[in-house]
């Protein structure tokens, strides 16, 4: 059995206002070609198919077009679970129709036995068991009680997640015992394991509000030939095990991942034998580059990139002490006539100046966009009675821009 493990597509995600549909389309076309070329028989998509719970039409079109293309290939099965960015009801809505294409969707937590899928070959014989656990929301695994502390909530949350995975594993084991002959078994999940690697700007969210609940890797069921996880965007083994993996996101989610290799996992399974796992690198469909330093180093790097005639999106991080008047204008002049495009400029000197005027112990990473705006108001000595009105207007503007982006999709 050849399996392809992927996750965290985040279809519909933007990068500082730029829509990325050409990238998503190219990535899914490449993925479909790999499935055909490698003779993949089962595709596992471990959550976060979409970036929002209400994906736009173009994001949906890419998803369903990919599923139809794979269904028409030599691939026999696709298993999709929901991630924390996905809407369980949205993913589940067409699942009966998709089942006719041998696409199996588990959008919401249900009875553990119902999350165990027995997949059959073209002769109708069982060939693969998949324990498909979607992202477990707080309400799926924990009963809230009045007066409980944050520590109590986290303890009960971890206990609930652990118990749910254990129940699914037990149901899978029972189904395997009922079979006439042994078949490979894999598990899927979307969660944050303790010790999992992330990088700045990769877009990975904490899964539970007010909690850093990361499940220890040892608490995950071990009686499967392969464990396919989603949520963390950096490709990695879980607790060093070759057959327990995060495939990572196939596209970089932010400039913090610029230059990092992305991949999917090709897994070969045979009952009773260790899984053979190969990582297949994903091509770079849209180069990203973070350029940082003082003016001289930034200008030199921009000159190199422009001379290379590369179509590249840039983040500029100015770290110099010198005050640069009209920084954006000077940067745009530097790349004029090239195929470079600046998506974001961070002036750390200006940020440091603003924060030093309010709270010297703060850094920009400590603040969200509304807190940064609040600090700007304070630095410019805007009267307190006006600050609340301006902050509310800023919130409404940000919300309106986000809604406009969603409608434009």
Image (cartoon, helix red, strand yellow):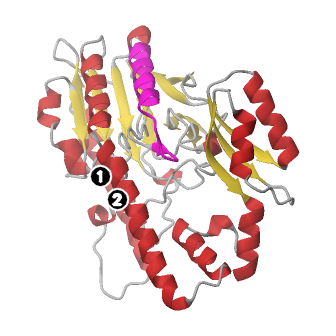
Read off the magenta span: 14-35
Q: Is residue 25 magenta?
A: yes
Q: Is residue 358 above or below residue 249?
A: below
Task: Name the one closer to the observer, 132 or 270.
Answer: 132
Task: Name the one closer to the observer, 156 or 383.
Answer: 383
The span from disc 1 to disc 2 (Cα, nearest Å) is: 6 Å
Picture residue at 57% right of the left edge, 71% below the top: 373
Give the secondary structure at mark 2.
Answer: helix
Q: Is residue 269 visible?
A: no
* Residue on which disc 1 sits: 167
* Residue on which disc 2 sits: 163
Name the chief secondary structure element in magenta.
helix
From the top left corner, tell me how far across and down residue 163 is, in percent.
Answer: 34, 59
Task: Name the one closer to the observer, 154 or 101.
Answer: 101
Q: Is residue 296 left or right of residue 166?
A: right
Counting every numbered tag in the picture gives 2
Q: Is residue 180 left or right of residue 17?
A: left
From the top left corner, tell me how far across and down residue 388 is, in percent.
Answer: 47, 83
The answer to whether mark 1 and mark 2 are in CB contact below 8 A is yes
Q: Is residue 234 left or right of residue 155?
A: right
């Amino acid at each position: 059995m050849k399996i392809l493990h992927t996750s965290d597509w985040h279809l519909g995600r933007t990068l500082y206002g730029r829509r990325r549909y050409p990238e998503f389309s190219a990535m899914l076309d490449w993925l479909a070609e790999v499935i055909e070329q490698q003779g993949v028989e089962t595709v596992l998509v471990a959550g976060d198919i979409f970036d929002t719970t209400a994906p736009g039409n173009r994001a949906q079109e890419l998803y369903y077009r990919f599923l139809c293309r794979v269904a028409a290939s030599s691939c026999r099965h696709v298993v999709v679970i929901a991630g924390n960015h996905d809407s369980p009801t949205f993913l589940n809505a067409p699942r009966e129709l998709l089942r006719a294409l041998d696409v199996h969707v588990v959008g919401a937590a249900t009875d553990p036995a119902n999350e165990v899928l027995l997949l059959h070959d073209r002769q109708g014989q069982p060939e693969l068991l998949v324990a498909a656990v979607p992202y477990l929301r707080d309400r799926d695994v924990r009963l809230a009680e009045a007066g409980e502390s944050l520590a109590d909530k986290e303890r009960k949350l971890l206990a609930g997640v652990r118990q749910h995975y254990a129940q699914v594993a037990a149901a899978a084991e029972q189904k395997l015992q009922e079979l006439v002959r042994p078949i490979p078994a894999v598990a899927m999940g979307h969660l944050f394991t303790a010790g999992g690697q992330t990088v700045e700007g990769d877009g990975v969210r904490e899964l539970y509000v007010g909690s850093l609940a990361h499940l220890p890797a040892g608490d995950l069921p071990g009686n499967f030939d392969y464990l396919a996880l989603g949520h963390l965007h950096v490709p990695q083994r879980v607790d060093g095990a070759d057959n327990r993996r995060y495939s990572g996101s196939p596209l970089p989610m932010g400039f913090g991942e610029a230059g990092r290799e992305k991949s999917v996992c090709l897994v070969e399974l045979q009952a009773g034998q260790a899984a053979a796992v190969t990582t297949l690198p994903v091509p770079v469909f849209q180069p990203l580059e973070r350029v940082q330093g003082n003016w001289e180093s930034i200008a030199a790097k921009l000159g190199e990139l422009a001379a290379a005639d590369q179509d590249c999106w840039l983040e500029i991080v100015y770290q110099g002490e010198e005050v640069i008047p009209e920084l954006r204008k000077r940067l745009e002049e530097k790349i004029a006539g090239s195929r470079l495009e600046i998506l974001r400029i961070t002036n750390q000197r200006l940020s440091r100046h603003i924060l030093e005027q309010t709270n010297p112990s703060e850094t920009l990473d400590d603040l969200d966009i509304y807190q940064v705006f609040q600090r700007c108001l304070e630095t410019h000595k805007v009267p307190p009675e006006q600050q609340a009105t301006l902050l509310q207007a800023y919130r409404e503007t940000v919300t309106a821009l986000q809604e406009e982006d969603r409608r434009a999709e």
